[in-house]
Amino acid sequence: MSEENPNLPEIQSAIPADELARLSDDIIGALKTVYDPEIPADIFELGLVYKIDIEDDRRVKIDMTLTAPGCPVAGEMPGWVQNAVSSVEGVSDVDVQMVFDPPWTPDRMSEEARVAVGWY
């Protein structure tokens, strides 16, 4: 009898599990170097990153949002994210997609981000 959760889809990847784990950790580390210029917290802790897909060819697809659609860095933020994640060893390409559904709310922030902005 399997102890795995039957409700979760099995992850199929051509990338060895240990490399996939390292890539995931390194990508998250890279995302944590990108800050929202108006809020003293990184985009990962703010909950702006909705999805990270690592394809078998090591292409990374990121769905992210902004704290507000009219954010002054809306045009620059995808490039910052692409540059940061492209620096991760083993990543072949990075595609950053801006999405606004669902809209971002402060509920998505981690406890670390809440402390950084004084919302605790």
Image: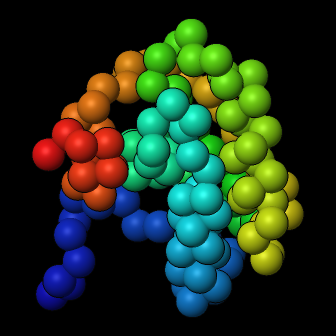
Tell which of 117 and 105 is nearer to you: 117
Q: Please give left or right for residue 1 compared with residue 25 in the image.
A: left
Question: Residue at horizontal 20%, vertical 69%?
Answer: 5
Q: Can residue 68 be seen in this view?
A: yes
Residue 93, picture quadrant: bottom right
Q: Quadrant of the N terminus?
A: bottom left
Q: Please give left or right for residue 17 compared with residue 68 in the image.
A: right
Toward the right, the furthest residue is 92
Question: Residue at horizontal 57%, vertical 17%?
Answer: 71
Residue 39 in the image, given as x and y percentages of width and height: 45, 36
Question: Residue at horizontal 62%, vertical 50%?
Answer: 34
Residue 16 in the image, given as x and y percentages of width and height: 63, 85
Residue 9, picture quadrant: bottom left
- Residue 99 lies, with reference to residue 53, above or below; the image says above
Toward the front, the furthest residue is 118
Residue 112 in the image, given as x and y percentages of width and height: 29, 57
- Residue 18 lies, with reference to residue 35, above or below; the image says below
- Residue 35 lies, with reference to residue 22, above or below; the image says above
Q: Can residue 51 be seen in this view?
A: no
Tell which of 45 and 49 is nearer to you: 45
Question: Residue at horizontal 80%, vertical 52%?
Answer: 83
- Residue 10 lies, with reference to residue 60, above or below; the image says below
Instruction: Give the number of marks.
Output: 0
Toward the top, the furthest residue is 70
Residue 85, picture quadrant: bottom right
Residue 52 in the image, given as x and y percentages of width and height: 56, 52
Q: Please give left or right for residue 114 compared with residue 76 in the image.
A: left
Tell which of 96 and 8 is nearer to you: 96
